[in-house]
Amino acid sequence: MKEMIEIINHVKADHIMIKSYISGGIDNGRNIMLVYLNSKSPLKIPNWFGYKATDYNAQKIKDEILAEFDSKRGAYGYGILLGKQPDGSFIICIDIDIDNDCKDSALKQFEEIFKKHNIHYYLETTKSGRYHIIYGTRQNH
């Protein structure tokens, strides 16, 4: 709970900067979505603005997204809806949720493939020590 309070305080204090990140991400063709910070659920619940994942397009509702973010300071974080983006590219996340020695072996194999094909990626290690590999592509894989 303390961590969430710190996040909410950060979002309130850095509201203008975070709003610029949201706006810039949308302008760069990314499906940015607002995520409720005050949810009682441990899951991050997005504000879909009445859309479904299949027809959500942040570029079409940018003004509505920014107005909602402004109207409820500290209520939202933000994220990127994975998959096909409004600019035609794709953002993909490989989630390695293995809790044994295979985890590091799987990561190494993915890293070798990415290096071989010159694919740039972002690696996140979760609090539980698992991995998220995030990358973008213009090709439909």
Image (cartoon, rainbow, N blue to C red):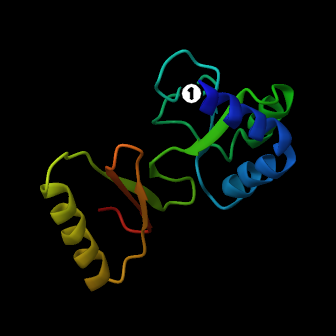
Q: What residue appears at the point 57 percent right and 60 percent down from the top-left corner?
A: 87
**Which sits in the foreground, 97 or 21?**
97
Q: Is residue 135 left or right of residue 108?
A: right
Is 101 drawn above or below residue 118 in the view shown? above
**Which sits in the foreground, 134 or 50?**
134
- Across and down, in percent, residue 93 comes to 37, 53
Q: Is residue 7 left or right of residue 43?
A: right
Residue 54 visible in rendering: yes
Q: What residue appears at the point 77 percent right and 48 percent down from the top-left corner?
A: 18
Identify the image quadrant of residue 30.
Answer: bottom right
Quadrant placement of the C terminus: bottom left
Q: What residue appears at the point 45 percent right and 52 percent down from the top-left corner?
A: 84
**Which sits in the foreground, 135 or 30?**
135
Q: How many marks?
A: 1
Identify the image quadrant of residue 74.
Answer: top right
Q: What residue appears at the point 85 percent right and 33 percent down from the top-left corner?
A: 70
Give the farthest residue toward the top.
Answer: 40
**Amino acid found under the numbered disc labelled 1:** Tyr
Disc 1 is placed on an element classified as: loop
The residue under label 1 is: 51
**Which sits in the foreground, 102 or 80?**
102
- Across and down, in percent, residue 26 comes to 68, 52
